[in-house]
Amino acid sequence: MTFLRGWHPLAVDSALAAVVAVMLAAAVLVTPQAGALDLAAVLVGSLSLVAWRRAPLVPLVVGTVSMLVFSVHAQPGPPAAFPVLVAVFGAVWAGHRLLPALASVVFLGVSLATDLATATGQSPKDIVQGTTLLLGWFLASGVTATVTRHRQAYLEQVEERAAEAERTREEVARRRAGEERLRIARELHDSLTHSISVIKVQAGVAVHLARKRGEDVPGALLAIQEASGDAMRELRATLEVLRDDPDGSGDHDGSGAQDSRLDRLDDLVERARSTGLAATVTISGVRHELPAEVDRAAYRIVQEALTNVSRHAGGAAASVRVDFGGDELVVQVDDDGLASADAPPVPGVGLLGMRERVTALGGRLRAEPRPEGGFTVRAELPLGEPT
């Protein structure tokens, strides 16, 4: 019943046994031939139904014997079959076949024989018809239990298939992600590696020829040679991450990742200066070991900010400030370019990448024009786990 769905199974079974016991006790009281033995048999057979779910054969045997005692002695009619019907249902639902059928045959056969031998007010035809109706109830109980058992097995299979389908979807998604990483790795290798290699070789040749002729090598050419070498190392590290990292987390400790740390900040700023950018560096606080993700993100933010100044600020000067705190690392890059609140620059992929890095670490990023003119990028990176 609907109002019993939330109950514990033991409570439901106890309530069922109590209801049957009360009904049959009332039948004992209105049956003239019934006595104390019949009441005891009724109570034992009814209360045994408490175990129909956990030990279905116990109420089947106890209920059948008890109700046969009641039926043979008092001849109450169909009410004596109620506990046996419930016990047959429980046994068939648990997967038993032979014992429920045998119990049904024994109960019906003994009851029919007793009624035929002792009946005085009924014709044998009426007795047989009544037994046939009881036989239909026993068959209905067995069929209902079989259908219920199959339905439960079907629902369990559906749940298993749903869980398997979910696992399969996750595996397919991981496989597709792996295939996509490999495709990106191939595209990066085919499209960028060759071009950067050509740039590096050409810059190296130009530097060699200039030195061979005794000419001063332009700083920009040296910067191109060094930057192309760094780009090749970082590209190789990125390709290793895409090919080797099974979950695509990108947490790789290759040589390119080692190059992308604040320990190389001076080299990064020196390369920016070689392109004509006036850049200064200020480091405050006690310098200490940083989490790899924070160290790498800080380096990339400075790198992207200086690149944006060189590209878009038109000869502006840049100042880099790194503040080592106890709980967070603050990185700030200011320039005195032409950006203003009235004409802010359009955010590009670089700023979007900065924001994504900072957000992934649980930090805060401010990238906007300065009131006195120019642009500022300020990243506050927590040194603990991202929240």
Image (spheres, rainbow, N blue to C red):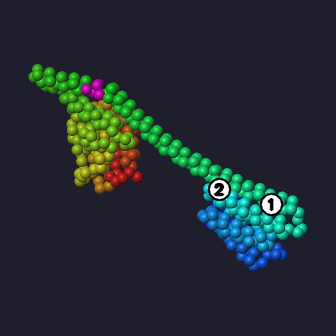
Q: Residue at x 80, y 70 (%)?
A: 75
Towards the viewer: 54 or 334? 54
* Span shown in magenta: 193-197
Q: Position of residue 251 (x, y in %)?
A: 33, 43
Tell me the quadrant of the picture where the N terminus can be found: bottom right
Residue position for label 1:
131
Residue position for label 2:
97
Q: Position of residue 206 (x, y in %)?
A: 18, 22
Residue 280 is inside the magenta segment: no
Q: Identity of the amino acid at label 1? A: Thr
Quadrant hosting residue 13: bottom right
Q: Position of residue 150 (x, y in %)?
A: 63, 50
Residue 273 horizontal side relative to residue 8, left or right: left
Spatial distance from mark 1 to mark 2, Cα to Cα? 21 Å
The main secondary structure of the magenta stretch is helix
Q: Residue at x 73, y 69 (%)?
A: 67
